[in-house]
Structures are given as structure tokens and as C-alpha cells.
Amino acid sequence: MLTYFQAIVLGLIQGFTELFPVSSLGHSVILPQLLGWTDVVAAQSASESYFLAFLVGLHVATALALLFYYRTTWAGIGRGLIVSIRTRRIETPEQHLGWLLVVATIPAGVIGLLLEHSLRVVFARPLAAAAFLFLNGLILLFGEWVRRRSVRRAAAEGSRLAMGERVDTLDMGNAIVIGVAQTAALLPGISRSGVTMVAGLASGLDHEGAARFSFLLATPIILAAGLYKLPDLLGPNGDGVRPQILAGSIAAGLAAYVSVRFLTRYFATRTLIPFAVYCLVVGMLAVIRFA
């Protein structure tokens, strides 16, 4: 059964790695195996277990931390969407950003409802997670290559892309591409923030804009995933572990808030390269360890 120590450690991992582009699900699969937490490992790949209830708490706590950090932005988006629906027009940056997030959320929402449970049961194993974590590193490197190539081309042509597009000027087609990219995070080891940032960079955003859109986009899908599975927490799966889930959720929420504060500043001037190297090294070592 889940201990308080395990819950807090896994909560911290969720909170930090959900936003860092290194895959929270991948780390939550790999680390328990390395620590010898065999009960947790078995629960992760079971079709029904306390781990399902645990994930509910972690997801809700992470989403609430993001909502609190971006509370002013979300208030503006909410007001903008209400006005836009009433007037049937998109006239302000807040309204445009709101609809971008709606459009980008749909692919992950639909595919998540259809495949999340099946993919978790099939791939929530250390070796698979390690291989996908290595792949995640390659994806991050690809994103940096695409961005640098685009910047060089844009600079030569005198295009504003050299400085990076603003998030609220992104078009709906690119928002859909970013939303589809987000579905890759259903695989343990593939980072939600990582793949959405790479898709954002490929769409013309700079690192700061790609990170902001990624974190805003993560909020509704993480919160919806938690609320959708609330019966797991309130039902038999949560019996006997709800206090531990509360402890882990508090840890996840605090870690997520610290992470988003740090990363929004980090990506104002820096790149995905350190995270790519981390994923490649850790992923390869884990593959060797579990092969």
C-alpha cells in the first residue's frame, strides 16, 4: 500500500516534472522501480488500483497551482470568451488566446478519453518509459534545430519571426498542431510541456511564448483529467489511501507552483538543450538498467 513518504516523493516528482520538459509519467514509472517500490510499480500498470485515485489528486493539485499562477490571465480569457460567444466575434488578444486554447485542448481531450487508460496499462513499465524518455530528448533537440533554422531564415529575410511570434497572434491551424502534439504525452516518458513547446517553436513562437502557451494549455487538460476520474478517488480505489493522496497532492501543488515560476523566467533567455541532454542520458542509462 502507498506510504506517506512514497506519496510525497511521487507528488514532488509530479509537480516538478509535469512542467519541466522531462515527463512526469515517465519519472513516476522509472523511479519506483529503481527504489524497489514493487507495490507501486504493480499498481501503475493494473487496470484498477489505488494509483488511479492517487493520480486524480496529483492532477487536480497541479492544475490548481497553474490556475493560481496564471489567475489574472485566466480571468481575462474567461471574460473574453464570454463576450466572444455573445458577440460571435473575436476582437481582443484575450479572446483570440482563449479560442486558441479551446481548439488546442480538443485533440488531447478526445484521444485521452479514448486511449489514456489503455496506453497507461500497456506502457506504464520501466523499460518502455526509459525508451520514450530517450525519444523525448531527441524530440527536444529536434525542436531546437527547427527553431534555430527558422530564426536564421527569418533573419536573412528580415521577418519578425526572428524575434518570435506572440502567443495571441498564433493562428488556429498551429494551435491544432500543438494540441495534437500534446497527445504524445499519453506515452510515459514523453513530456507534455516538451512536445507542446517543440510544436510551438515550430509554429514560430520563441521559447518564452512556447512555454507560456504550453503551461496555459496544460491547465484545462490536467484539471479535466483529474475531475473526470474523481470517482476513482471517491470510490473503492481510494479506500485506505486518501490521507496519503492528500499529502502527495499538497507536495505536487507546491512543486508545480515553484516550477512554473522558475520556468517562465528560465525560458525568457534559455533553451531546451539542457533538458534534452538530461533525457538522453537518463533515458539511455535506464534502458541499460531495465533491459
Image (tube, rainbow, N blue to C red):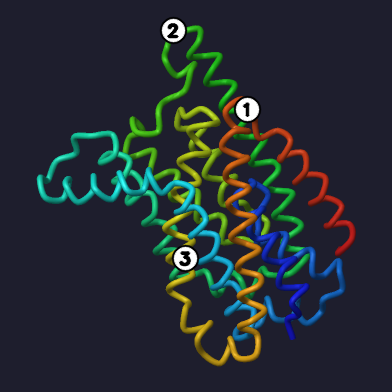
Q: Secondary structure at mark 1?
A: helix
Q: Secondary structure at mark 3?
A: helix
Query: Is label 2 in contact with label 3 (beta carbons under 8 Å)?
Result: no
Question: How far from the left and from the top, in percent, is residue 136?
Answer: 67, 47
- The amino acid on which the numbered mark 1 sits, given as a three-letter code, is Trp
Q: Which residue is mark 2?
A: 158
Earlier along the polypeptide chain: callout 3 or callout 1?
3
Question: How far from the left and from the top, in percent, is residue 25?
Answer: 65, 62
- Name the quadrant of the N terminus: bottom right
Quarter residue 172 falls in? top left
Per the rendering, the mark at residue 61 is none
Query: Is label 3 in contact with label 1 (beta carbons under 8 Å)?
Result: no
Q: Residues within 10 Å of mark 1 (few under 14, many from 20)?
A: some
Q: Which residue is mark 1?
A: 145
- The amino acid on which the numbered mark 3 sits, given as a three-letter code, is Gly
| Residue at 63% from the left image edge and 85% from the top image edge | 49
